[in-house]
Image: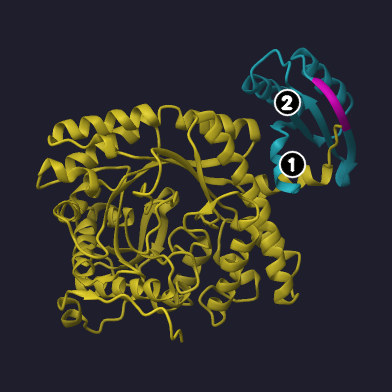
Chain colours: A yellow, B cyan
Amino acid sequence: MATMNPHEILETIRMIDQENLDIRTITMGISLRDCVSDSMGRLCEKIYDKICRTARDLVRTGRDIEEEYGIPIVNKRISVTPVSMIAEGTGASDYTPIARALDRAAKEVGVNFIGGFSALVHKGYTAGDRTLIRSIAESLATTEYVCSSVNVGTTKAGINMDAVAEMGGVIKRAAELTAGQDGLAAAKLVVFCNAVEDNPFMAGAFHGPGEPECVINVGVSGPGVVKSALEAVRGKPFDVVAETVKRTAFRITRMGQLVAREASRRLQVPFGIVDLSLAPTPAVGDSVAHILTEMGLEMAGAPGTTAALALLNDAVKKGGVMASSHVGGLSGAFIPVSEDAGMIEAAEAGALTLEKLEAMTCVCSVGLDMIAVPGDTPAETLSAIIADEAAIGMINQKTTAVRIIPAPGKIVGDSVEFGGLLGHAPVMAVNRFGCGDFIRRGGRIPAPIHSLRN
Amino acid sequence: MKKAIVTVVGDDKVGIISSVATRLSQYQINILDITQTIMKDDVFVMLALVDIEQASAPFHEVKEGLDALGQAMGLSIRIQREDIFNSMHKV
């Protein structure tokens, strides 16, 4: 029986046309474990060939789905096995050739980012992990599409403070090597605690060791849709707010599930997960911060922001979980500063500080994301910010991350411009009190106790 | 049966339904259901449920053809697979 519901059809079209509803990313995870070789040249060749072969139809399939369903799919991306795991056998002292091979492959298949120049060192380093981390700054500065991540802590293992100390320096060097682009390389580098293996979002995506040969993960979006749904319940109690967010998240996720299944079928690659994250862009009407202001806050960062974000993050998950057969990734509300018009506004107005952002990361899906700080911020301060953030993740059994850009030559009040999805950001003030002796201790912060929870 | 929804939105004028139906028939696309209304400010809205199983051209060509017709008539005409609406609104 053929039936149509004009109201539903027009509502969907309005969400897409006016409220920026889109699929943020289709990310193909590719295992590179079979590329292992004792020759660097051979390894790079195998990596390049495998990615080009496996992801050959990814971009075209994405476009076809986009066209047939009339839903924009903003990004097509690739995540690969953490490079430190497959490069060790070469015995090389520098992994930048691998980053270049990844970059060439990304360009060849037409994706706009490739993630997985990564190492998992939450409990300690292998030789390959050390080489990879030493190669990050140069690799990100000399490639266009490669993204890198390092996991420095987990709830079960504690925090590797040697890695935390080292990463402050890596971030600093990455930014300095790309001083002409406001430190762009640091925007492609994420330091995680409790990193997830199936995250489709960049810059932190990698294809975890527990993942299959190849997999399709989809990240949805739609902060604009949530905001406009909340406009209809202005002044109503929070019960209504939560219900409204849940219902909206359900719809958004259903669409993600449809696209994920369709992409998986057409590419003949298993469907992995739908990531429920509300991911903003700098475009007007695509802001997570504006959902918070719609709830009644003058600006993101005002007192009440953490509570508002907690409600939002939880309701998005509750609504989305039922809409998809497999939910995973980071799933929640992202709060990047430079990629969100409302967050930029709030930071510029002084409503949003680094400390408030840190509090927000206790309840949001990830962490301190796309934050520009003065170029003269010491490496140990960056490390200490990472340590704080990792501690929040470790204790609260959640993923936290730091993607921070010490913009070379910039001071508080300046702004940095990364362009495109990465957006622009005001340079935010950092607490200037010292933490060098703390960071230089090194060693490991032990894993936390799981009872006596207060 | 492979179903799609055709949506036509724009200023009302004579012959919209007939032109759209003619163009669809040229592609061997059968109309299963159709509804039309005039919203406020004389905005014409038409929705058609169609079967594209036997379409004589690939989807992107149909889409481009409808788009061209829309531009010629000063209307927005889109075609989307029906699943997207079902998935979003039905459990």
Q: Residues within 10 Å of mark 1 (few under 14, many from 20)?
A: some
The answer to whether residue B31 is magenta is yes
Which residue lies at the image location 25% right of the left edge and 49% below the top edge? A140
Residue at numbered disc 1: B86
Secondary structure of the residue carrying tag 2 is loop
Quadrant in which residue A289 is drawn: bottom right
Q: Amino acid at mark 2?
A: Lys
In the image: residue A12, left or right of residue A370:
right
Q: Main secondary structure of the magenta part?
A: strand
User: Residue at the spot x=20%, y=81% of the render?
Assistant: A438
**Relative horizontal placement of residue A178, taking residue B13 as reference (left or right):** left
Instruction: Give the mark, 1 or 2, whose residue is nearer the N terminus.
Output: 2
Residue A221, given in percent of the width and then of the height, sits at 56, 52
- Name the chain under label 2: B
Among the 4 quarters of the image, the one containing residue A404? bottom left
Q: Residue A102: x percent and y percent?
A: 28, 38
Q: Which residues are magenta?
A: B30-34
Would you place residue A398 above or below residue A58 in this image? Answer: below
**Is residue A452 positioned above or below B86 on the image?**
below
Q: Is residue A454 left or right of residue B28?
A: left
Instruction: Name the residue type under label 1.
Output: Asn
Cα separation between marks 1 and 2: 13 Å
> What chain does badge 1 belong to?
B
Q: Is residue A190 magenta?
A: no
Res A19 visible: no
Q: Classify mark 1: helix, strand or loop.
A: helix
Question: Looking at this view, is B48 or A87 the one in front?
Answer: A87
At 15% across and 78% down in the image, what residue appears?
A: A441
Q: Residues within 10 Å of mark 2 (few under 14, many from 20)?
A: few
Task: Point out which mark residue B2 bears.
Answer: 2
